[in-house]
Structures are given as structure tokens and as C-alpha cells.
Image (spheres, helix red, strand yellow):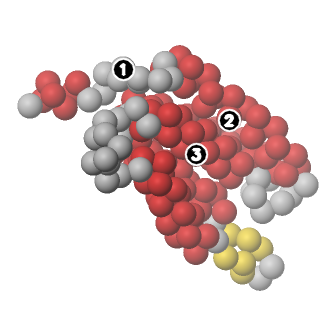
Amino acid sequence: MLQQILGEFQNNFSVVPVGAALARLLAAVFLAGIIGAEREWRRKPAGLRTHILVSVAACLFVILGLEISQLDFGDKNEQQHDPLRMIEAVTAGVAFLAAGLIFTAQGEVKNVTTGASLWLAGAVGLGCGAGQMPLAALATVIVVTVIFLLRQVERIFGTH
């Protein structure tokens, strides 16, 4: 049984190879980081971390869509599940919850990054549910690293 569980973490990417997934996720970090840095510089509520989390989540959802579309859900006559509608349902539901976390107190927006990280957690959950634990783990490591490193940068430069 342990062997079967460990086997779930093997490279089981069927459409997007792990190297390509890593490159796409890191590109999402870098490019959204450029936008987020500008927002941070202008002292907007959604800054560097938030933009990166949303970008990585969106990237992960697309890769998962490609991977999930390859799962066997039966032929057209017996298919009861549309994999892309599963993603849509999760993203909409989690986005609703995430939006509920964001509030304004005394003119200051709070919890934007937490809302984005919750949305990202939805993508990670979809990945795990689709058997894409390596992809979900890859995104998780990238995001936790980004959050941690940018928090350190914010402390050094006193931006938050």
C-alpha cells in the first residue's frame, strides 16, 4: 500500500512534462512579479505576493485542465463528468470564499494575499484530486518560497 501511495508522486504528467510545467510556473512567477512590483511600488493593496499567487494559480489551473482532460471519464454516451466544469466549479467557489476574506478596515485593504493563497489552494486541491501531486507540490513549493522570500524583502525595505 505504501508503494502505491508513493507511486502517486512519480512523474505522471501525461500532457505537460515536469520540466515544461516548472518553466511555465516560474514564468508565471516572474511575469506577474513584474506587474506586482509596479503595484507594490505604487503602494496598492494587491502587490507583489498577491499578483504572483494569482498568476501561479491561473497557470496551475490551465496545466491541470490539460492534464485532467486526459483522464478517462468514460465515452461520450456514459460520461457523467466534464473535467473542465470541475475546475470551473472549484475556482468559482473558492474565489467566492477568498473574496469574503478581503475587507477594508480604516481605509486599508486587508487579506488580499490570503484570499489569493486560498484560491491557489483550490488549484492545489484540484491537482491532488486529478492525481497530479507532483505538479501540485511543485506549485506549492514555488508559492511558499515566494511568500517567504518576499516577506523577508518587505521586512528589509519596510514596505509592509
- Whether residues under marks 1 and 3 lie with C-beta atoms below 8 angstroms apart, the answer is no
Q: Residue at x 67, y 76 (%)?
A: 103
Q: Residue at x 54, y 25 (%)?
A: 21
Residue nearest the viewer, comparing 62 with 57: 62
Query: For mark 3, does the 10 Å Cα neighbourhood hold few (<14), some (14 to 19), or many (20 or more) residues?
Result: many
Asked where in the image residue 95 lies, by quadrant, the reply is: bottom right
For residue 66, say whether it is visible.
Answer: yes
Disc 1 is placed on an element classified as: loop
Query: For mark 2, does the 10 Å Cα neighbourhood hold few (<14), some (14 to 19), or many (20 or more) residues?
Result: many
Amino acid type, mark 2: Val
Tell me, for residue 119, which label it has, or none. Answer: none
Amino acid type, mark 3: Ala
For residue 151, say whether it is visible.
Answer: no
Rounded to the nearest angstrom, the CA distance separating label 1 from label 2 is: 22 Å
Front label number (1 vs 2): 1
- Residue 2 lies left or right of residue 40; in this view the side is left
Can you name the residue that lies furthest to the left here? 1
Rounded to the nearest angstrom, the CA distance separating label 2 from label 3 is: 10 Å
Pointer 2 residue: 29
Q: Position of residue 149 (x, y in %)?
A: 63, 38
Q: Residue at x 44, y 37 (%)?
A: 69
- Whether residues under marks 2 and 3 lie with C-beta atoms below 8 angstroms apart, the answer is no
Residue nearest the viewer, comparing 16 with 36: 16
Pointer 3 residue: 57
Disc 3 is placed on an element classified as: helix
In the image, residue 73 sits, relative to residue 1, either above or below, namely below
Disc 2 is placed on an element classified as: helix
Front label number (2 vs 3): 3
* Quadrant assignment for the C terminus: bottom right
Pointer 1 residue: 11
